[in-house]
Amino acid sequence: MTRPTRPTPRDVVSGFVTGLFSIPEGMAYATVGGFAAPMGLWSGAVPTVIGSIFARSVLMVTTLTSAIALSASSILTDAGLDPGDLGAVAALTLVVGLWMVLLGVLRLGSVMSFVSTAVMTGFTAGIAVQIVAGVVEDATGYAPQSHNTVGKLVEAVAHVGAWDGPTVAVTGATVAVWAGLSLVPRLRKTATLASLVVVTVVVAVAGVGVEKVSDIAAIHRSLPPLTLPDVGALPDLAWGGLAIALIALAQAAGISAAVPNPDGSRADASKDFTAQGLANVAGGFFGALPTGGSLSRTGVATSGGARTRWAGIFAGAWLILLVLVLGPLAGAIPMAVIGGLLLVIGGELVAGRRRDIRLVIRTSWLSAAAMIITFAATTQLPLQRAIFLGAGLSMVLFAVQAALRGRVLELVAQDDGDFTIADAPTVLPSGRTTVLHYAGSGFFAEVNRLEEQWPDAAGTHDAALVISLRGSAGVPSTTFLKSLDRLLDRWHHQGVQVVICGVPDEERRRFDRGGVSERLRDSVIGDQGGVLATVREAYDLAEGRRRAASATTHRGPAGPTDRPGRPEKESP
């Protein structure tokens, strides 16, 4: 599918909505972290433009998040630096950017490929809950004292009597206007902007007494300020910068899953990480705090109709223009309007994952458990720990499923030369050649379980065995080689002729290195031929050897009556 590279009218509108939205939300996040409010503004300017230019998740908006703001404040304080020192903040933003670029260049973003749909669903839902919990005060007028995500929601509900009436009314009106406009197809994409403007105007005209953006800090008409990093502070911020980089990776990880590229192209976590790094390197020189992929701001962009990466570029450009032209007027936006719209965005994120949630629950209890555990971790632990816990869960989940997936099957020769699939016999039949197919990966946990599924050859005589490995045993497992060696011992002890077919070149080299080839001299057939042709070749070789061995032992070919078990099939 061709990627759209030209901006669309929807991108212009979406960029305007996102840029306008970035004014109050950016200032609020900066204030929460103990920074000057304008720094939150500039975190949505240059970094957003640069991040959108280079990101592979084309709708991802790179900007300040609450988790990054809080972490940045803590790291500066721990390093003995003042969060109000612009040089120190610029140094921290630069360090974060350099770590992000390094991790992206090293392709460490590929760790996200180990995160299953179940884990990513739990993570995205947890982030949505974090967004909702983060705007409780703006939406209700009540400030929870809990620092825990779920605790904030529980505390807010428990103190519903302390909610501020006008604030709740404005929040409710914002959600209601958005919902009403969303019912009209033509207005759906502009519902976020329209509800923000309509409710803000009504509140201003009616003189409703609620907190406004201007109550956080005044917005002056100015361009992003040029700032120089404090070079002397760089060593003290090195490890703290890495911590913020990991937090940003964890937050951005859910964006490509929750908001796929409209053009159908695949995202690339490593390149997204590099894009965020470049955004921070540039932002460090223009008054920005550390930034990363923001799920909430990306949600605003997509809700506003974003179609290409130009939506993010316009968002940064619109923000600068709005501050220059309408700076003081933007201060009239009620914080309750922002709270209401973020409640909508959080709800949309969860609603967008409903199908995945149902699919995970219906798939298996292991997947459901992984989703629930990741959701709980995202709401209770630092985000970088939650996402890596999720990656670990994904790998454990894969290991368990892989260990249970492998099977040993019998390929039964038919008169027409084809083979049918049947369950492997528990006892290896005497007097004939049996063809078995190993359907597995060679993964060590799987091998240990399957070793007892191979037919017992303790009482077998005058038998041959063909083992097909085509498409199997692809994992370079020492356990598989040792298991095969033990099985060969058993079969050879009973005089069973063994031929292995469908062995790829790489697996054959492992046979050579592991000494298996010496046990199977001239009895290993590659996988270059057709599937059935390879099996037939192995069958003919094994059957010929069985008959020769039988003739040597009994001084003559074994007759059909000497072959118990299943009826003999002629050589295919």
Image (cartoon, rainbow, N blue to C red):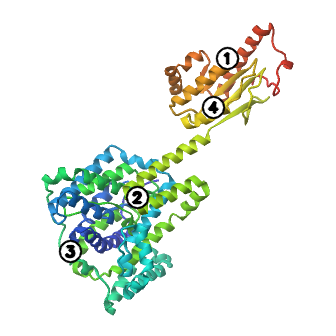
Q: Secondary structure at mark 1?
A: helix
Q: Where is residue 236 shown, x and y percent of the image?
A: 19, 52
Residue topped by disc 4? 451
Residue topped by disc 2? 4
Residue type, numbered disc 4: Glu
Q: Which mark is first along the chain, 3 or 2?
A: 2
Q: Which mark is first along the chain, 4 or 1?
A: 4
Q: Where is residue 96 shown, x and y percent of the image?
A: 26, 54
Closest to the observer: 48 or 517?
517
Q: Which mark is residue 493?
A: 1
Residue density around tag 4, few if under 14, some if 14–19, many if 20 or more, within 10 Å: some
Q: CA distance from mark 2 to mark 3?
A: 30 Å
Q: Which mark is residue 324?
A: 3
Q: Where is residue 253 shown, x and y percent of the image?
A: 40, 56
369 left or right, relative to 432: left
The answer to whether mark 1 and mark 3 are in CB contact below 8 A is no
Q: CA distance from mark 1 to mark 3?
A: 87 Å
Image: 561 above or below 95: above
Q: Secondary structure at mark 2?
A: loop
Q: CA distance from mark 3 to mark 4?
A: 73 Å
155 left or right, relative to 359: left
Q: CA distance from mark 2 to mark 4?
A: 53 Å
Q: CA distance from mark 1 to mark 2?
A: 66 Å
Q: Secondary structure at mark 4?
A: helix
